[in-house]
Amino acid sequence: MTIVSRRTLLRGSLAAGLAGPALFAAESARAAGPIVKPLPPELFNVFGTNAETRWESLRGTGYHTPIDRFFVRNHTSTPLIDHRTWRLDVHGSGVRRPLRLSYADLRALPAREVSAFIECTGNGRSFFTSQQGQTVSGTAWKLGAVGVARWRGVPLSRVLGLAGVKREAVDVMPVGLDAEWVDGSVNRGHVRRPLPIAKALDDVLLAYEMNGEPLPPDHGFPVRVVVPSWIGIASIKWVGSIEVSSEPLSSPWDTNYYRLFGPSYPAEGSAPLTEQVVKSAFELPFPATVGAGPQQLTGRSWSGGGRIRRVEVTTDGTTWRRATPHGAAGRDGWLRWSVPWRPEPGTYQLRARAVDEHGHTQPEQTEFNRLGYLFDAVVRHPVTVV
Ligand SMILES: Nc1nc2c(c(=O)[nH]1)N[C@H]1C(S)=C(S)[C@@H](COP(=O)(O)O)O[C@H]1N2
Ligand SMILES: [Mo]
């Protein structure tokens, strides 16, 4: 394995007229339309550069979300990156030995597999409006901006260890190689968000495989960060550099965005968001039409705060029945469940609510925040029985 110190490499590259990570973005990443994989309407709802999974397409699939229906959230476009020229730079005031790793270097390090959801912070955002009558900004997701995959790669702690993390290191900032993001008229730069050193050294993965396949372009090929249990923006795709700092770092993604803003929060917003909240979804179209007679309602519940311990469903709005778990509740994943139902023709609002092992529940209402983050209230799912 050839792990070269970044300083040595930079000297070489500077001599050749090169200038660090930005160059790789320009050289090896080219725009390929916002999303590369097919987005058939029976699997996805498309919103510009983003695509949400249709929940009914998960019915009958296993625990892990198949790649062909895993949601995509892109600030700009999926870049096509050549793994042969890709490099990961690990640098900053918080490391003793800045590093530059190739794809082969990373692949040669001891690997780990982690099963975890990635979920957009705004998943469920449209229900602020449809259920609570509130105006929020951002993509009007229903509940399909979440998926669970098997991620294989190298623990970030291992790579940081090779770079020699200093005791005074506080923040770690992975930076994406996709295009800089222009928000209205403001260029916010490359997608990036600092992680506290404690989380970075805990369970974060530098993943190069998803469900046993090389990471697909839309999900971060060649390498993405996977931050289990945290909001999706933490899991930077197409990572090209990681800054480790002995001073606190910040980016628009933890100051202007991904905090709670609104009348119940301080003017500068809440603290930067970290863990996901509790949610439940039925594997049905939204709204759904089903036939009368005996059937099974199926769904999944998940939480960033711990394993799901109990799920209850109501089909009449008053009686809550315990759902039957299918398989075990995954840590950083979800619990699949079902309840029998024998409806007469009519209109219904199905609801499911879950509790995790640390007692986090789903409220009737989510406190308003302008950017529509962390909607955890019980969703009323309209169903017509014919
Ligand atoms: N480089 C980069 N990383 C990124 C993003 C992005 O646009 N660029 N989007 C983030 C957001 S907001 C989410 S929710 C997840 C989505 O991951 P997925 O597209 O693999 O489902 O990736 C995160 N990582
Ligand atoms: Mo997101």
Image (spheres, rainbow, N blue to C red):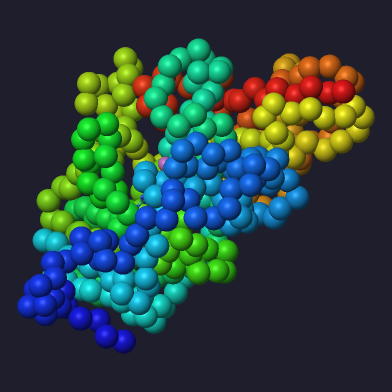
Image height of 221 relative to 38, above or below: below
- The quarter of the rendered structure image containing the N terminus is bottom left
How far from the left and from the top, in percent, is residue 90?
22, 67
Residue closer to the observer: 169 or 208: 208
Q: Residue at x 43, y 16 (%)?
A: 135
Image height of 145 relative to 25, above or below: above
Residue closer to the observer: 342 or 384: 384
Image height of 235 relative to 182, above or below: below
Image height of 205 relative to 141, above or below: below
Residue closer to the observer: 386 or 232: 386
Residue 342 appearing in the image: no
Q: Residue at x 73, y 16 (%)?
A: 318
State how many labels appear.
0
Q: Residue at x 58, y 38 (%)?
A: 45
Q: Where is residue 25, by image quadrant?
A: bottom left
Q: Where is residue 242, by image quadrant?
A: bottom left
How far from the left and from the top, in percent, is residue 191?
29, 48
Q: Residue at x 33, y 35 (%)?
A: 258
| 181 on left or right of 144 | left
Q: Where is residue 268, by image quadrant?
A: top left
Which residue is at the far top? 133
- The quarter of the rendered structure image containing the C terminus is top right
Residue 211 appearing in the image: yes
Which residue is at the far bottom? 1
How far from the left and from the top, in percent, is residue 240?
28, 63
